[in-house]
Image (cartoon, rainbow, N blue to C red):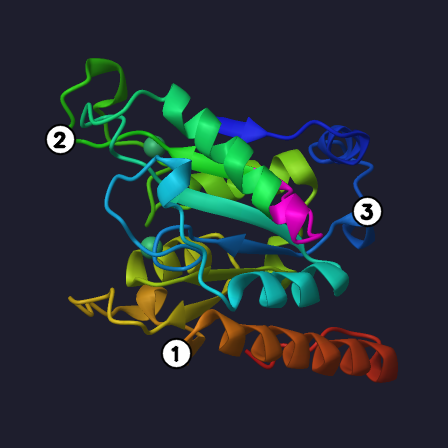
Amino acid sequence: MALMFSNSRSSDALRQVGSAEVNPADLRPAIFLDKDGTLVRDIPYNVDPERLEFYPDVFPGLQRLDAAGYSLIVITNQAGVARGYFPESALATLQVCFQQRFQDAGVALTGFYYCPHHPQGIVADYTLSCNCRKPQPGLLYRAAQQHGIDLSRSWLIGDILNDVEAGRAAGCRTILIHNGNETEWLLSPLRLPHHIVSCFAEAVPVILALAAVEFTSARNFGYGSSLL
Ligand SMILES: [Mg+2]
Ligand SMILES: [Zn+2]
């Protein structure tokens, strides 16, 4: 249920991952991005590209992360498919729109992964308990394998604790954008964000500062920092 962009880099990475020859140094870090309420204003079950409203600080932030070498990968729950609100093909259209908007901003969108399932859906094919609906980490694992991602150097940015849980479960660090969308605050060790910020722009210097610390630590002492 993932839409992948084919390019030689990802197919090379795919060949490497899963083979004994994979060199951890060849893996790239990623930023896993929740969509609704994180990149775009949350309009429930919207798949109309005309109504996509990116937050104004998103692309300036993504440009800095892209320049710092992070692969940018969208990870989104789209239970509207299982609920019969829209066909899965609508997500292909939405993905093309995302790809175009990223391209217009000069940043690469490495992948757009969605979970179309829901345990209480009405469309039989999509009505199931899956391992890809956040808080499950299935989509992150799939993206990591298909694009040669080092999960331990990667981050997830989301606006609810189910995003955080998926990120932590996959071994990533996590940032919660505290914008009012999380309302239940059911905390547990897996759901505790590493950092809490108030908008997308504030997440970026956290990631870049820690990457700089770890780079310095690795250079000076020959190992990566485990500050967090
Ligand atoms: Mg969200
Ligand atoms: Zn799923």
Question: Is residue 136 shown left or right of residue 28?
Answer: left
Picture residue at 61% right of the left edge, 48% below the top:
102
Is residue 189 something one can see in this rendering? yes
Residues rendered magenta in the picture: 102-111
Query: Does mark 3's beta carbon lie closer than 8 Å to ligand 2?
Result: no
First-in-chain label (2 vs 1) = 2
- Circle 1: is it few (<14), some (14-19), or many (20+) Cα within 10 Å? few
Q: Secondary structure at mark 3?
A: loop
Q: Which marked residue is nearer to the observer: mark 2 or mark 3?
A: 2
Give above or below for 164 relative to 82: below
Picture residue at 35% right of the left edge, 63% below the top:
159
Residue extending farthest top: 124
First-in-chain label (3 vs 1) = 3
Q: Position of residue 11 (x, y in %)?
A: 75, 28
Q: Nearer the viewer, residue 205 or 127?
A: 205
Picture residue at 41% right of the left edge, 50% below the top:
35
Look at the numbered discs 3 and 1 and tell me whether their residues touch, using CB distance below 8 Å: no
Q: Nearer the viewer, residue 54 or 61?
A: 54
Give above or below for 155 relative to 117: below
Label annotation for residue 23 = 3
Q: Amino acid at mark 1?
A: Ser
- Disc 2 versus disc 3: distance between alpha carbons? 42 Å
Q: Position of residue 193 (x, y in %)?
A: 39, 72
Q: Which marked residue is nearer to the observer: mark 3 or mark 1?
A: 1
Residue to which mark 2 is pinned: 120
Q: Report the predominant secondary structure element of the magenta stretch.
A: loop
- Disc 3 versus disc 1: distance between alpha carbons? 37 Å
Q: Amino acid at mark 2?
A: Gln
